[in-house]
Image (cartoon, rainbow, N blue to C red):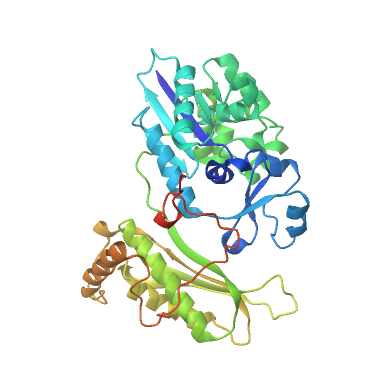
Amino acid sequence: MNVFALVDCNNFYASCERIFQPLLADKPIAILSNNDGCVIARSDEAKALGLPMGAPAHKFASFFRQHNVQVFSSNYPLYGDMSQRIMEVLRQFTPEVEVYSIDEAFLHFDGFQDYDMEAYAQQMRKRVRTWTGMPVSIGLGPSKGLAKVANRVAKKFADRTKGVYVIDSDEKRIKALKWLPIADVWGIGRKHAKRLALNGVQTAYDFTQLSDDWVRKHMTVVGLRLKKDLEGTATIPMELEPASKKAIATTRSFEHHISSYEELRERISTFATLCAEKLRAQGSSCHAVYVFVRSNPFMPNLPQYRNGMLVAMPTASQSSLTISKYALKGLTHIFKSGIEYKKAGVMVTGIVPKATQQLALFGAEDPRHEALMQHIDLLHRKYGPHKIKLANQDLTRTFKMKQAHLSPRYTTDINDIITVR
């Protein structure tokens, strides 16, 4: 018997803050994006107040004060470490764990036919809460799609389900699918939801009543797999090995406007270097670099400008020197004087595994780059990041985001570790 489970952390970012500050329990919490720009996560209490997702922080400052909303800058080192700890706990219950996102994981249970899966999931939920402090909801079913549906039931009716719901009969499956709106089905985007609504599909159950031919024609084989999953036939496989990213980006909004080419050039070089470091960390190289610049759209009184350019490289690379070089080539073509730039970024794409990249007969990269990058990465692991920079970077400057509401990095920085009196 195959059973799939989806474990989803409840209000993950807000819960990470509450774990280390218990007095925040039941208080509305809002987590802000990079540079404290807008709201990217809300606790249930904040949602109940009507705080919208994506709310600009500067426009909602009075709202935060009026409703005593606890505001935090995004603390990604803390969130990432807590996620890793939770995933390690889950691996104690089954070796087949697919980390789907920072706060979600699919689990596959094969050969557990003699287990009471609801009791097993409650045990799993209790251990995650005891060992990490994180509240989770767990949905179980005969496929990943139905595990997702069961998870929504577990979370929506937490008082009755105690955070765990199992779809283990056709009666439960049909009841859950008739309850779930089609727009809330995993894998159904806004475009497909509109098209399905025009064809009379209002719920997940309605979707399963469509013919296979119609679904394959209008939603490709991906949509057909989802339909089969919701019918109870597992067709969406587990992805146990972390896949390499198809693109890696480093983008930043600046604390102040940048108008000079020299300053913008330094930022682009730094962003390109960060992308190269991420490539090397996952053992990949890239074939192309995309660079973009943007003025401030919230200041219409200033000249508005946005542009970007994709620059192909003669051979795939993971060298900070090479990727920075081609990113700056792109910048020279799109830079426009007289503009107050507020945001810029670099994205590397055409990513391939380093071990299998195709070699070039002409225009090959300097073979000394590989050894140089290995030594730089080694020094950064030993002495900390950003100790060694390219000559076109500002040697005295370390880019720091605006994080006026940043909580301590309790689990990743020895200086922020909790002191017990």
Q: Is residue 343 left or right of residue 316?
A: right
Q: Quarter of the image holding residue 341?
A: bottom right
Q: Is residue 77 left or right of residue 112?
A: right
Position in image of residue 246 (x %, y %): 42, 55
Position in image of residue 141 (x %, y %): 50, 23
Position in image of residue 132 (x %, y %): 46, 37
Determine the residue positioned at 48% across, 76% down: 267
Residue closest to the far top = 114
Q: Is residue 222 above or below residue 263?
A: above
Q: Nearer the viewer, residue 292 or 229?
A: 292
Q: Quarter of the image holding residue 38?
A: bottom right
Determine the residue positioned at 44% across, 79% down: 328
Q: Is residue 157 visible?
A: yes
Q: Is residue 210 left or right of residue 374?
A: right
Q: Is residue 395 above or below residue 276?
A: below
Q: Quadrant of the N terminus?
A: top left
Q: Quarter of the image holding residue 403?
A: bottom right
Determine the residue positioned at 35% across, 78% down: 390
Determine the residue positioned at 64% across, 43% down: 43
Q: Is residue 411 above or below residue 130?
A: below
